[in-house]
Amino acid sequence: MRRVPGVAAVLGLLLGVAACSDEPGAAGPAAATASSASPSPTTPSLPPPPADGDLPRGGRAIFPKYQLVAYVGMPGSPALGPLDKDLATKAARLEKLSRAYAAGRTPLPVMELITVVAKAGPGKDRMYRGRLPDAKIQEYLTVARKHRMLLLLDIQPGRAKILPEVKRLERWLKEPDVGLAFDPEWAVGPNQVPGRVFGRTSGAELDSIASYLSGLVQAHDLPEKVFVFHQLSTRIVTGQQALKKHPGVVTIKSVDGIGAREDKLETWGKLTANLPAGVHTGFKLFYTEDARHGPLMTPAQVLALRPRPELVVYE
C-alpha cells in the first residue's frame, strides 16, 4: 500500500490554497510583533494562556495522563481535514470524539493547523510552499484556548529548509499550549516538486527540531511541548535512531498509512518497529480516503493497536 502524492485532487488543492502567502517575509516575526502590538479591528486579541503556564487541562506533563485526539486542516480547504471552517462546531465534535478514546486517561483534544502548506507552483521565492497569515493562526489559537485544547502548527515545507520554517513560528511556539507538527512527505529537494515525488527527512534533522523546541521550553519555563512528525512509508525517514530524547519535548511519530484496515495495520507494524527511545506513537484516520476501502476504524480498534497510539489524528 502507498499513498500516491501526484493525484489531481491533491495538486489542485496545493495550487489553489488562497489563505497562504508565498512571499518570503509574509507572516514573519516582524509581522507577528506588529499584529500583537496593534491588533486590527477584525482580529480579536488572544485570550490569556492557561493559568500558571500549565497545559490547557492542567499539569505540565503530557503522558501518561493525557490521550491526544486531533482534527487537522486549514481554512478554506475541506479536503485537507475538518478544520476548514465552523471552528466552534468542529471543536464541539472533537471534544465528543476525544472522550471515546479516554480508556483510563484524560482526553486532551488537539487542533492541528496546517500553517505552512506545500504547493505545486514555485511562488515568488520558488520554495513551493505557502504560509498562513498570523491573523489566521491567532484565530485558531483563540478557539483552541476557548475550548481548552492544544494547537499544533503543521509544516509542509516544500523546497524550504524545515528548521528556519520552525524558527519563523517562534512567537507562537513560546506559548504554553502550542506545539509543532512536521509532514516530511512534502519536504522535497532543491530540484523537486511537491506532489510529484515523496519528500523525506532524517533522524538527525528531526533531532535538530526537537533540540530547538527543548531550548524554548527551558528558556521560557514552558510545560512539555508536543512535536509530531508524520510518516506514511519507511523511506520518508532515514536514520531515525539519531532522534534522541530532549528535556521538555514529547516526540510522537504519527503513522499515516491510507487504505483498508489490513493495509493500515501492515503500515503500523512496519513504522512502529524499532522506534528510537522515548518516541511515542500516533495513528491517522482519513475520513475520505480510508472510507473508500471500507468502514473507518473505530476507537476501540485503534486503541487495540500495540503500542497504544497516544495521539489519534483525523483528516
Image (tube, grey):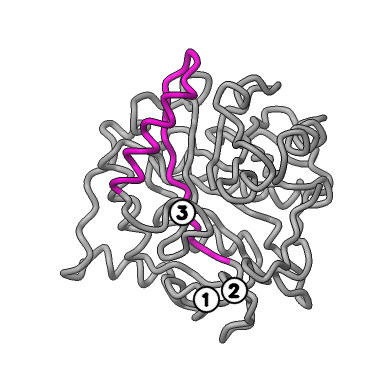
Sequence order check: which comes first, mark 3 or mark 2? 2
Q: Name the kind of residue labelled 1 in the image.
A: Gly
Q: Name the kind of residue labelled 3 in the image.
A: Leu
Residue at the spot 52% in from the left edge and 48% down from the top edge: 180
Residue 106 or residue 297, whichever sits in front: 297
Q: Residues within 10 Å of mark 3 (few under 14, many from 20)?
A: many
Q: Which mark is residue 113?
A: 3
Determine which residue is flagged by label 2.
Answer: 12
Residue at the spot 41% in from the left edge and 58% down from the top edge: 84
Left or right: 33, with 215 as reference point: left
Q: Is 119 situated above or below 177?
A: below
Q: Name the kind of residue labelled 2 in the image.
A: Gly
Badge 2 element: helix
Q: CA distance from mark 3 to mark 2?
A: 19 Å
Q: What residue range appears in magenta? A: 88-117
Left or right: 71, with 51 as reference point: right
Task: Residue 90: say if magenta.
Answer: yes
Which of the two discs, 1 and 3, sits closer to the camera? 1
Determine which residue is flagged by label 1.
Answer: 16
Badge 1 element: helix
Q: Quadrant of residue 45?
A: bottom left
- Residue 242 lies, in percent from the top left, at 78, 41
Q: Which mark is residue 257?
A: none
Cβ–Cβ below 8 Å for labels 1 and 2? yes
Q: Is residue 207 visible?
A: no
Q: Is residue 198 visible?
A: yes
- Residue 272 lies, in percent from the top left, at 76, 32
